Amino acid sequence: MAEKGEGRSEKKIGTYSSPIAFAYIFNLIVGAGVLALPQAFNKAGLALGTILLLILCAMSYISASYVIECMAAANAYERMSKRRERVKDMTAQSRKPLNYSLKRRSPSLSKDSGDSLSHSSTEE
C-alpha cells in the first residue's frame, strides 16, 4: 500500500512561488502609483501633472532622508547604551576585591654587583 504523502510534492507552509515573489518585488520597487501616473497626467494636464510630480518627488526625498536620519540616530543610541553597559560592568568588576592567590615576585637583583639597579639583562 502506498503511504499517504507518497507520489506528490508537498508544499511548505509560508513559501511563495516564483511568479508571486516577482509580483511582490515588482510592486515593492515600482509601486501602484507608477501604474496610475498616465491617468493622473491625463486628468491634470501636462504642466500641472509635471509640477505636482516634482513636488511629490521632493516630499518623497525629504521623507526618505528623515527615515535614514532616524535609523542612524537609533543605531547611535543603541551603541551608546551598549557602551554604557560595558563601562558599568567594568566599574563594577574593578570594585570587587582582587584575588591575590599568586605570590608576587620582586625583580631579581644581581648579588654579585653592589649596584641595586643591575639586572640579569646587562650580562652578555
Image (cartoon, rainbow, N blue to C red):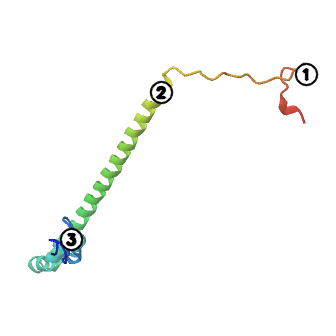
Q: Within 10 Å of the Cα at label 1, are there few (<14), some (14-19), or many (20+) other Cα atoms?
A: few
* 65, 58: nearer the viewer: 65
Badge 1 or badge 3: first in the primary sequence: 3
Type of amino acid at the residue the image marks with label 2: Gln
On the image, which quarter does residue 15 sit in?
A: bottom left
Does 116 appear above or below 53? above
Q: Residue at x 36, y 43 (%)?
A: 78
Coordinates of residue 119 in the picture (x, y in percent): 83, 27
**Residue 96, position in %: x, y?**
48, 22
Q: Nearer the viewer, residue 23 or 104?
A: 104
The quarter in which the N terminus is drawn is bottom left
Asked whether the residues under the numbered discs 3 and 2 touch, taking CB atoms below 8 Å apart as contact, a structural biologist would say: no
Please state if 104 lies on the left or on the right of 122 as rendered.
left
Relative to 99, 61 lies left or right: left
Q: Under tag 2, what secondary structure? A: helix
Please indicate whether residue 93 sits to the left or right of residue 58 in the image.
Answer: right
Q: Amino acid at mark 3?
A: Tyr
Residue that badge 2 annotates: 93
Rounded to the nearest angstrom, the CA distance separating label 1 from label 3 is 85 Å
Q: Position of residue 86 (x, y in %)?
A: 44, 35
- Label 1 belongs to which residue? 113
Q: Earlier in the sequence, mark 3 or mark 2?
A: 3
**Residue pictured at 55% horizontal, 22% vertical:** 99
Query: Quick check: 110 above or below 64?
Result: above
Distance between mark 2 and mark 1 Cα atoms: 43 Å
Q: Is residue 17 left or right of residue 86?
A: left
Question: Vertical placement of 73 versus 50: above or below?
Answer: above
Q: Residue at x 73, y 22 (%)?
A: 106
Front position in the image: 65 or 101: 101
Q: Which residue is mark 3?
A: 16
**Closer to viewer: mark 3 or mark 2:** 3
